[in-house]
Image: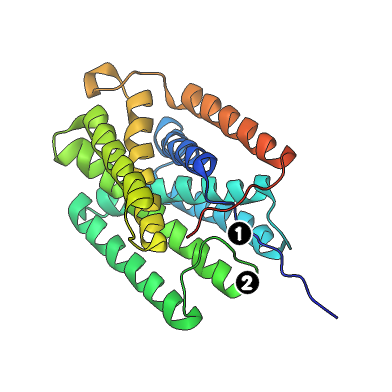
């Protein structure tokens, strides 16, 4: 009897990256909504959102195939949790953006190294069993937390501001896209670099939307921005649920 192992992760296509940026921007605005607008604080917000991450992760690990709504719920949960976790490290614990980013870089490298050591690969285009999927989601959680710290560093400490940080990161993402199409750099390496970079882009773009003009933002607020971003992401998730799964980009 032949056992079919169904894939449990999204196709890495252009639409995937659009949804990832939308999800990470939502993670920034929703994380700030809970920790700052609702004044829950970074520590309690982190505990709440880590709990949300664990719940969505449990159902994702239990499912037998790729289910768009569930998959993107976990992506959003890692982004929101990453926002408050990074802010707690950098601001509440006083580590600062540079040290916080360095710690998270080391953690992410360790996770990827252990994943490669145990599985012999870092494939992101087809995952059908629990152990590599667990590594996949842990790496995503830390990459989104790292991205928040990098985005805050660019916006605050570097002097670029929210717009400048978003433009810089957007330019780097464009270079990664060019490297994908015109170089032979390992596709998995390019994936993780792009995956990390989309988070600071979302962090800076989210802050640009929500912060006051005095702070360099557009003052749309965390509530309105989160509602609009959530609506866009839900619409895209519904769209991907209704169409056939596309051919995968090599990774």
Front-most of 64 and 251? 251
Q: Position of residue 139 (x, y in %)?
A: 44, 63
- Crowding at dot 1, Cα within 10 Å, few <14 / some 14-19 / many 20+, comes out as many
Q: Is residue 87 visible?
A: no
Front-most of 246 and 118? 246
Q: Nearer the viewer, mark 2 or mark 1?
A: 2
Secondary structure type for disc 1 = helix
Q: Position of residue 21 (x, y in %)?
A: 45, 39
Q: Position of residue 107 (x, y in %)?
A: 33, 67
The image quadrant where one finds the N terminus is bottom right
Residue at figure coordinates x 22%, y 36% from the top left: 155
Q: Position of residue 220 (x, y in %)?
A: 41, 19
Q: Which mark is residue 187?
A: none
Residue at figure coordinates x 58%, y 51% from the top left: 11
Q: How is the image coloured?
A: rainbow
Q: Is residue 58 visible?
A: yes
Q: Which residue is mark 2?
A: 130
Q: Which residue is mark 1?
A: 57
Q: Vertical placement of 100 versus 155: above or below?
A: below
Residue at figure coordinates x 33%, y 43% from the top left: 173
In the rendered image, the residue lying farthest to the right is 1
Horizontal side of 159 relative to 192 (left or right) equals: left
Residue at figure coordinates x 58%, y 59% from the top left: 54
**Mark before the other along the chain sequence, 2 or 1:** 1
- Crowding at dot 2, Cα within 10 Å, few <14 / some 14-19 / many 20+, comes out as some
Secondary structure type for disc 2 = helix
Q: Vertical placement of 143 versus 218: above or below?
A: below
Q: Quadrant of residue 110?
A: bottom left
Whether the residues at callouts 2 and 1 have beta carbons within 8 Å, the answer is no
């Amino acid at each position: 009897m032949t056992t079919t192992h169904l894939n449990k992760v999204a196709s890495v296509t252009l639409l995937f990256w659009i949804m990832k940026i939308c999800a990470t921007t939502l993670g920034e605005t929703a994380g700030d909504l809970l920790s700052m607008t609702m004044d829950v604080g970074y520590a309690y917000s982190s505990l709440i959102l880590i709990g949300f991450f664990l719940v969505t992760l449990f159902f994702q690990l239990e499912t037998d195939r790729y289910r768009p709504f569930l998959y993107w719920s976990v992506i959003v949960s890692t982004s929101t949790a990453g926002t408050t976790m990074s802010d707690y490290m950098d601001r509440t614990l006083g580590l600062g953006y540079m040290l916080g980013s360095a710690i998270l870089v080391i953690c992410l490298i360790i996770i990827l190294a252990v994943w490669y050591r145990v599985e012999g690969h870092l494939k992101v285009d087809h995952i059908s069993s629990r152990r590599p999927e667990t590594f996949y989601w842990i790496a995503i959680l830390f990459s989104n937390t790292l991205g928040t710290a990098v985005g805050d560093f660019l916006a605050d400490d570097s002097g670029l501001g929210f717009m400048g940080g978003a433009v810089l990161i957007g330019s780097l993402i464009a270079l990664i896209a060019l490297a994908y199409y015109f170089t032979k750099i390992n596709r998995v390496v390019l994936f993780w670099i792009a995956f990390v970079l989309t988070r600071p882009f979302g962090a800076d773009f989210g802050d640009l939307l929500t912060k006051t003009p005095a702070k360099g933002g557009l003052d749309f607020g965390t509530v309105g921005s989160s509602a609009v971003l959530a609506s866009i992401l839900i619409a895209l998730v519904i769209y991907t649920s209704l169409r056939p799964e596309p051919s995968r980009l090599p990774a």
